[in-house]
Image (cartoon, helix red, strand yellow):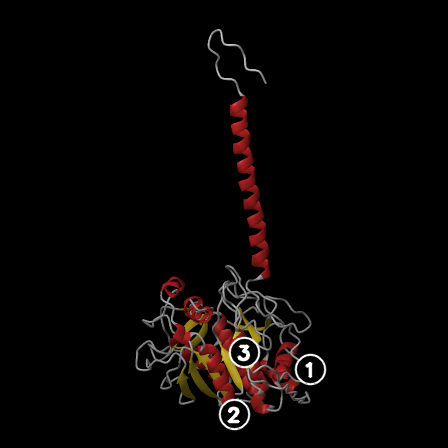
């Protein structure tokens, strides 16, 4: 199997947000702006400064339903990077439509560009991890990287990515890393969800793990980490991720959900507020502003980064920052960066196959297992020698053996 195809299918099978965002069984209507998440992000106060006017946010996901009432005509859709024609299916765009609604709840005057790069679980072509091993689909191998480049070339100022792979075998994709650098080089802010594997293996995830990406953890109403949110050093900030009300394609209303998916989309909305008001700020400057105005800006931890985003504080701080765009050369592969003064401050993570903590545990367990095997072999061999040397019952009149 090609690594790229396996990785793409892995996104559909263990997609950290598509499979991990848990949607409540019962739907109930709730007006936009009434959820606790908007108050927690200080969005009402931020709307006195910016509502995201004129900014396009690309939502790279499972597609969107443009006619959903919650989106209210504020969304369009680009190419389907899976190369399919499923828009009329009842399940189409379930996750992506919800993510678009979160962006627009925060930035109501923004526009969403939906780009389909993964499948919803209800899709008949959706594959589990085991199925992807047996029936790889190379068509999806480069969907995410192609969608990122398309967004950068078609007017997006913010890219929201509530998906990812938590696969220890093929986590890093050089092509995707280059696509993100290409977007950054064009002044596009890239936001990605941290993942929902924090209470399990807590593996390194991508695209959130690529340099230059703003990584967002899921937080609770108290501001702490949601129990499922992935814990890693690349987590920059946190945003509400529990009991979040997003657009539902079945009921045409809203349902409650949880996961780092909505946390990432909400933060992308905050980035849109900043970019709309201060369009000359570089992506790195937007990231710095979000971090420096979060709930604990002087203390970073891998659970929630610098804390919960505060949209109003971020906008006020952005007004005091002198825009200093710094564009690095972009080669044919798309390498380069647009991080503000200097580079993005993050070392390249080429070929990082597995989380260091997981690797250490695996090595320790392997050594223990090896020791047990060697001990068992020595015991067996020792027992055999003892049996060879132990005299059996001697027949009457037989002389004892000579050692």
Query: Residue at label 3?
Result: 191
Q: Secondary structure at mark 2?
A: loop
Q: Earlier in the sequence, mark 3 or mark 2?
A: 2
Of the residues tagged 3 and 2, which is closer to the observer? Answer: 3
Q: Foreground residue, 30 or 18?
A: 18
Mark number, residue 342 = 1
Q: Residue furthest top?
A: 397
SS at mark 3 in the image: strand
Q: Residues within 10 Å of mark 1 (few under 14, many from 20)?
A: some
**Circles 2 and 1: CB atoms closer than 8 Å:** no
Residue 133 placement (x, y as % from top left):
39, 63
Work out how far the residue at label 1 is from the one at label 3, CA to CA, in angstroms.
Answer: 20 Å
Q: Nearer the viewer, mark 1 or mark 3?
A: 1
Q: Secondary structure at mark 1?
A: loop
- Asked whether, in this view, residue 263 is left or right of residue 80, the answer is right
Give the mark toward the camera: 2 or 1. Answer: 1
Q: Quadrant of the C terminus?
A: top right
For marks 2 and 1 on the same chain, the one whose residue lies earlier in the sequence? 2
Q: Is residue 291 visible?
A: yes
Does residue 71 appear in this view? no
Q: Which residue is mark 2?
A: 53
């Amino acid at each position: 199997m090609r690594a790229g195809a396996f990785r793409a299918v892995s996104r559909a099978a263990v997609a950290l947000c598509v499979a991990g965002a848990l949607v409540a069984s019962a739907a109930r209507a709730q007006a936009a702006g009434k959820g606790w998440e908007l108050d927690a992000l200080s969005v009402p106060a931020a709307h006195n400064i910016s509502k995201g006017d004129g900014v396009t946010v690309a939502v790279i996901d499972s597609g969107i339903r443009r006619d959903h009432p919650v989106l209210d005509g504020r969304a369009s859709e680009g190419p389907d990077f899976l190369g399919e024609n499923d828009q009329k299916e009842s399940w189409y765009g379930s996750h992506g439509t919800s993510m678009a609604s979160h962006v627009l709840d925060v930035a109501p005057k923004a526009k969403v560009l939906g780009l389909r790069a993964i499948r919803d679980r209800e899709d008949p072509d959706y594959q589990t991890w085991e199925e992807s091993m047996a029936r790889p689909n190379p068509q999806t191998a480069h969907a995410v990287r192609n969608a990122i480049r398309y967004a950068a070339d078609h007017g997006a100022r913010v890219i929201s990515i509530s998906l990812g792979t938590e696969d220890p075998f093929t986590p890093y994709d050089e092509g995707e890393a280059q696509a993100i650098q290409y977007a950054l080089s064009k002044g596009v802010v890239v936001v990605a969800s941290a993942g929902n594997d924090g209470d399990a293996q807590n593996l390194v995830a991508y695209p959130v793990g690529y340099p230059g990406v703003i990584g967002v953890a899921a937080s609770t109403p108290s501001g702490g980490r949601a129990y499922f949110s992935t814990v890693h050093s690349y987590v920059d900030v946190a945003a509400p991720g529990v009991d979040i009300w997003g657009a539902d394609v079945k009921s045409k209303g809203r349902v409650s959900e949880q996961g780092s998916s909505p946390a990432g989309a909400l933060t992308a909305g905050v980035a849109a507020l900043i970019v709309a008001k201060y369009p000359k700020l570089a992506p790195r400057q937007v990231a710095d502003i979000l971090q420096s105005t979060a709930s604990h800006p002087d203390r970073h931890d891998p659970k929630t980064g610098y804390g919960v985003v505060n949209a109003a504080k971020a906008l006020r701080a952005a007004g005091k920052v002198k825009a200093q765009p710094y564009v690095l050369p972009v080669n044919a592969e798309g390498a380069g960066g647009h991080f503000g003064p200097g580079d993005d401050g993050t070392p390249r993570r080429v070929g990082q196959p597995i989380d260091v903590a997981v690797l250490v545990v695996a090595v320790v367990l392997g050594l223990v297992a090896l020791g047990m095997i060697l001990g068992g072999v020595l015991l067996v061999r020792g027992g055999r020698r003892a049996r060879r040397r132990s005299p059996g019952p001697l027949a009457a009149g037989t002389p004892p053996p000579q050692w």
